[in-house]
Image (cartoon, rainbow, N blue to C red):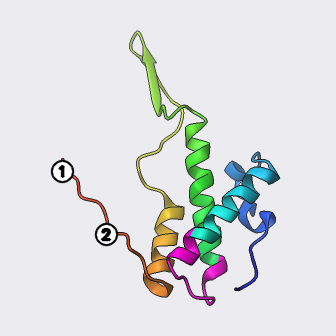
C-alpha cells in the first residue's frame, strides 16, 4: 500500500479542518483507508483518494456541528449558518479518483424535482 496520508496532509490550510482533534482525524483517515481499499483505488492515487474521502467525512462532521440546520428564521429575519447546498467538493474529488483509478459499486442517485 502507498504511504498513508498524515493529519497534516488532511488539514492542509483548510480552515474548516483545523479545529478537529488529531484523534478524530485519525479515525476518519482509518475509515477512508477502508473505503479506498473497498473501491480498489490503485496505489497511483491511493493517498489522494484517502485524503479526499477523509475530507468528505470531516466536511459532513463539520456540517453536522450545526445540527444539520442550514438556516433559521424568526419574525421575518433569517440567518444562514452554513451553505450546504448538497455540493461536496471532497466527495466529487473522491468519486473522480475512483472513476479514474478504482472500481466502485456506487450506482449513483436518482431524484425528482
For residue 108, above or below residue 78: below
Q: Nearer the viewer, residue 11 or 4?
A: 4
Q: Tell me where residue 87 sits by quadrant.
A: bottom left
Residue 53 image point, x, y percent: 58, 65
Q: Check contact, mark 1 vs mark 2: CB within 8 A.
A: no
Q: Residue at x 49, y 77 (%)?
A: 39
Q: Residue at x 76, y 45 (%)?
A: 19
The residue sitting at the top extreme is 75
Label 1 packing within 10 angstroms: few (<14), some (14-19), many (20+): few
Q: Nearer the viewer, residue 6 or 81?
A: 6
Q: Residue at x 48, y 42 (%)?
A: 83
For residue 106, above or below residue 41: above
Residue 34 image point, x, y percent: 60, 69
Q: Which label sits on residue 112?
A: 1
Q: Is residue 4 left or right of residue 50?
A: right
For residue 18, above or below residue 65: below
Numbered range of the magenta stretch: 35-47
Residue picked out by circle 2:
107
Which of the two labelled residues, at mark 1 and mark 2, occupies the earlier sequence position? Answer: 2
Q: Residue at x 62, y 66 (%)?
A: 32
Mark 1–mark 2 distance (CA, rounded to whole Å): 16 Å
Residue 102 image point, x, y percent: 48, 84
Amino acid at each position: 500500500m502507498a504511504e498513508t496520508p498524515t493529519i497534516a496532509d488532511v488539514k492542509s490550510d483548510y480552515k474548516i479542518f483545523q479545529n478537529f482533534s488529531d484523534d478524530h482525524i485519525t479515525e476518519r483517515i482509518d475509515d477512508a483507508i477502508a473505503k479506498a481499499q473497498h473501491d480498489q483505488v490503485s496505489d497511483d492515487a491511493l493517498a489522494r483518494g484517502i485524503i479526499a474521502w477523509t475530507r468528505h467525512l470531516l466536511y459532513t462532521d463539520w456540517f453536522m456541528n450545526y445540527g444539520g440546520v442550514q438556516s433559521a428564521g424568526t419574525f421575518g429575519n433569517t440567518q444562514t449558518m452554513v451553505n450546504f447546498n448538497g455540493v461536496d467538493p471532497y466527495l466529487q474529488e473522491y468519486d473522480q479518483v475512483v472513476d479514474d483509478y478504482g472500481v466502485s459499486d456506487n450506482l449513483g442517485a436518482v431524484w425528482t424535482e
